[in-house]
Amino acid sequence: MRTSNSLFARLMRRVGIVLALGAAALTTAAWFYARTAANEAYDRLLLGAAFQMSEGLVVADGRLRFLLPPSAFELLGLAERDRIFYRVVDPDGATLTGYPDLGPKIDLHASRGGPVFSNGSYLGVPVRNVTVARAMSMPRGPGWAYVMVAQTTEARQALASELTTRAVILVGIMSLVAVIGTALAVRYSLRPVGELGTALRRRDPQDLTPLKVSVPSELSPFVTSINHFITRLDERVKLLQRYIADSAHQIRTPLTALSAQVSLIDEAKLAPEDRRHLERVQSRTAELARFTNQLLNHAMVIHRFDSIQLAPVFLNDVARKALRNAVPITVDPDLVVSFEPADEELAVLGDMLSLREAIVNVIDNALRHGAVARLEVHVRQAGDFGSVDVLDDGPGIRPEDWPTATSRFYSGRSDAEGASGLGFAIAAEVAARLGGRLRFRQRSESELFCVSIELPLAERPS
């Protein structure tokens, strides 16, 4: 089954992207706000100092004089990192006091309508300027004096950085809380998906009734599709069951009648050549009957594993019944058949009918293609496994053919008469469905060839 990233991961990824974009936007807004707030705060200090300095302009003895108020520098001294520069210009445009090269490009007349702020640089460092104008009554007539104050920007930049850092920390904390809260909310919201999967896993294999679970409206189309599929599967399974049952009846009945009709032919009245043909017909009829039974039994085994509940069974009992069913009454009297049960009852989790069919196929294969004078069936414990061993004194299967011996329609000998190649395939499939394995063993030429069905042991039923 192909799987992509989980729905939880996809939702969290998209929520994370949205939160990251939101955090970036908030951080950018915080930076602009912090810079604006710092500029406004320090601009007010700068403007206050400029107004106080403009109050120091007086006309005495017909001349404009400037008395620097100490409070102006005390106000600007709140920004300890910054340096202060000032310039006072008289109505004639001459520098009365201060730095004469401060703000040479500033339009002084623009400040008559109100304070004018500007950015610039002085002595190689960035500064913030403010220019204020004051009307003066001079002896020769009214005029305008100007006060320019410049302040370096280190303190306002530090304040903007501090405000931005605090805002970033706050945004980070809120984003982390939002991610954690979103993760919990998404987990809780996706619980119905997990509950639906659990309900499907816990259903009995033969339960093909529609699901009856309470799910959110978003999952209703999914449950409806599952129920539609279950309904179609139920119809197909019932159709297959009827087909197998009908096939078993329709095929076995004619084969039985054919075998009976062939057996009624009086061989004594036949010519030797016709008698050989009759023997071949009898052989082919028996072969066809065995092959058909194996095919139907194979289909039966597959169906049973899909429709029954496994239960503990005892290996001694199932092996004994399989030997009784597999060995015909008319077996060669020179063939020694023996059964050796385990000393204690070995229970495995399985299906009695399917497991018996698997052992019957192994014993039948040994009778038809292996055993010459000896056939033994042993039940034993091998560690955590229970094993049913079928041994014979025949040639066995070559070790290089063991990996393919359990394939369907495999035959180790091209001249093997009546070999359908399904016996080991059925036994191997049953063992695999029960968590076990089919093994071949022949340690030396003097020992019997052994085919083992090994299954994990289960607790005994009480």
Image: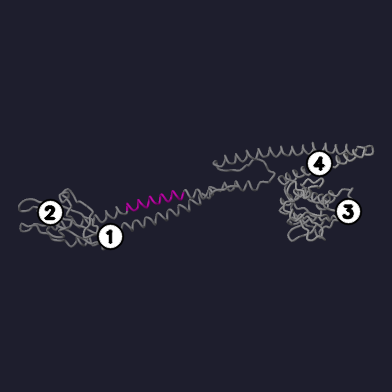
- Dot 2, crowdedness within 10 Å: few (<14), some or many (≥20)? many
- Please say whether residue 16 is visible from this viewpoint: yes
User: What residue is shown with label 3?
Assistant: 335
Q: Quadrant of the C terminus?
A: bottom right
Sooner in the amino-acid sequence: mark 4 or mark 1? 1
Sooner in the amino-acid sequence: mark 1 or mark 2? 2
Examine the residues drawn in magenta and state their main secondary structure. Answer: helix
Q: Nearer the viewer, mark 3 or mark 1?
A: 3
Tags 1 and 2 touching, CB below 8 Å: no
Assess whether residue 10 is covered by the magenta stretch: no
User: What residue is shown with label 4?
Assistant: 288
Task: Give residue 347's quadrant in the image.
Answer: bottom right
Distance CA(mark 1)–CA(mark 2): 29 Å
> 242 above or below 383?
above
Chain part drawn in magenta: 15-33
Taking the image as shown, residue 14 lies to the left or right of residue 459, namely left
Amino acid carrying mark 2 in the image: Ala
